[in-house]
Amino acid sequence: MHVRGLGLPDETEIQLWVVDGRISLEPVAGADTVFGAFGGGWILPGLVDAHCHVGLGHSGEIPLDEAIAQAETERDIGALLLRDCGAPTDTRGLDDHDDLPRIIRAGKHLARPKRYQAGFSIELEDESQLPAAVAHEAKRGDGWVKLIGDWIDRSVGDLAPLWSDNVLKEAIDTAHALGARVTAHVFSEDALPGLIKAGIDCIEHGTGLTDDNIALMLEHGAALVPTLINTIENFSGIADSATRYPTYAAHMRDLHARCHARMAAARDAGVPVYAGSDAGSMIAHGRIADEVEALKGIGMSATQALGAACWDARRWLGRPALDHGAPADLLCYAEDPLSGPDVLRRPDLVLLRGRAFRPKN
């Protein structure tokens, strides 16, 4: 199999051959040209959704056939590498399906009782259990562990941290000793300093980032996955439903109002920013193109925003792009995928480990 077109981000013509499911940069005699035979078109590595809960439903765990359907939706829009950021369903069996995206798993969310959405997480009765739980999830994941950094504390009526600083340091050190990275769900301001100083590798959402916290992220090398479409579309509704907790509701509205400015400040300061849709509960699967578009709203160029869901994200996650010998996970477009989400979400040809799919969308 053979494809040719303009490769991004360089926009130079490339030719790739596919042999036994892998990319070859060496010509292969007699290969069938399945894209670009007459010139034109664009070729990308498969898209990355760096916050995509395959195996999560509205109430938590789901049957495996539903998880497969979620993964198929992602494949058909070109998202071929997914970091799940926590899921209650054991999806490791999906690795046996050669027609589904690769999933980088973070095990199950780690939280405290009544401090996250019911059915989503492992709830630890005592925070001292966190290092052992992190070790367990690190061993069953794919190099990531997911913490819940803050959530509403109904006893105070507002967002509050779940863990003390010394416990976080021990837990994150434990993960790092096992070769795993750690990320955390964080909405508010107060949980961020302890997580960042403890060595957290990534912050999810991060709506409460202050200038001081941004400086800490730069000092400690933490990345940011802002999940902008989730914040834009859902924070106001969350606030409206919190009638029993007016302080929390006002806080959520304030975080929503400041979100774009805070994410832009982090990006402008040099914090690495990657694209994640937060699909799986309040966000439907298959929306990474919308997140790429949203990243332009915090000052990213079209190329930078696409890179945050493609070649840059792959590098961050330690996965290859269009390299010789890499799995042939790539997308072909007749129109320029930098032109917007309507094109990006509709590749003309998807190659997944060398197997061709022509999405019906």
Image (tube, rainbow, N blue to C red):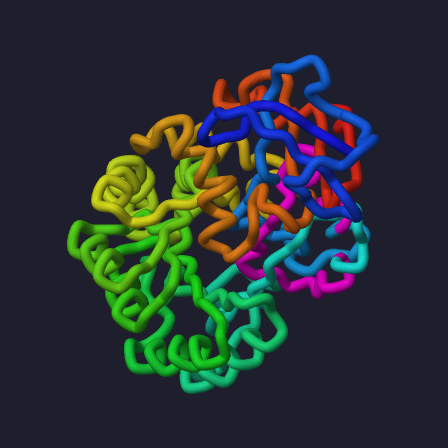
User: Visible in this render: residue 38?
Assistant: yes
Looking at the image, residue 97 sits to the left or right of residue 337; the answer is right
Q: Residue at x 51, y 49 (%)?
A: 314
On-image quarter of the N terminus: top right
Marker count (numbered) = 0
Looking at the image, residue 106 sits to the left or right of residue 92; the answer is left
Can you give x and y, in whole percent of width and height, for residue 158 in the image?
Answer: 32, 58
The quarter holding residue 62 reads bottom right
Most foreground residue, 173 or 4? 4
Q: Residue at x 56, y 72 (%)?
A: 122
Can you give x and y, in whole percent of width and height, for residue 242 in the image?
Answer: 41, 48
The magenta-colored residue range is 68-94
Classify 291 as above or below 337: below
**Most distant residue in the left direction:** 212
On-image quarter of the C terminus: top right
Classify 135 as above or below 339: below
Residue 74 within the magenta-colored segment of the rendering? yes
Q: Residue at x 60, y 52 (%)?
A: 53
Most foreground residue, 44 or 297? 44
Can you give x and y, in whole percent of width and height, for residue 28 in the image?
Answer: 76, 37
Residue 76 within the magenta-colored segment of the rendering? yes
Can you give x and y, in whole percent of width and height, for residue 286 in the image?
Answer: 63, 36
Most foreground residue, 126 or 144? 144
Q: Residue at x 33, y 67 (%)?
A: 161
User: Visible in this render: residue 57?
Assistant: no
Classify 264 as above or below 116: above
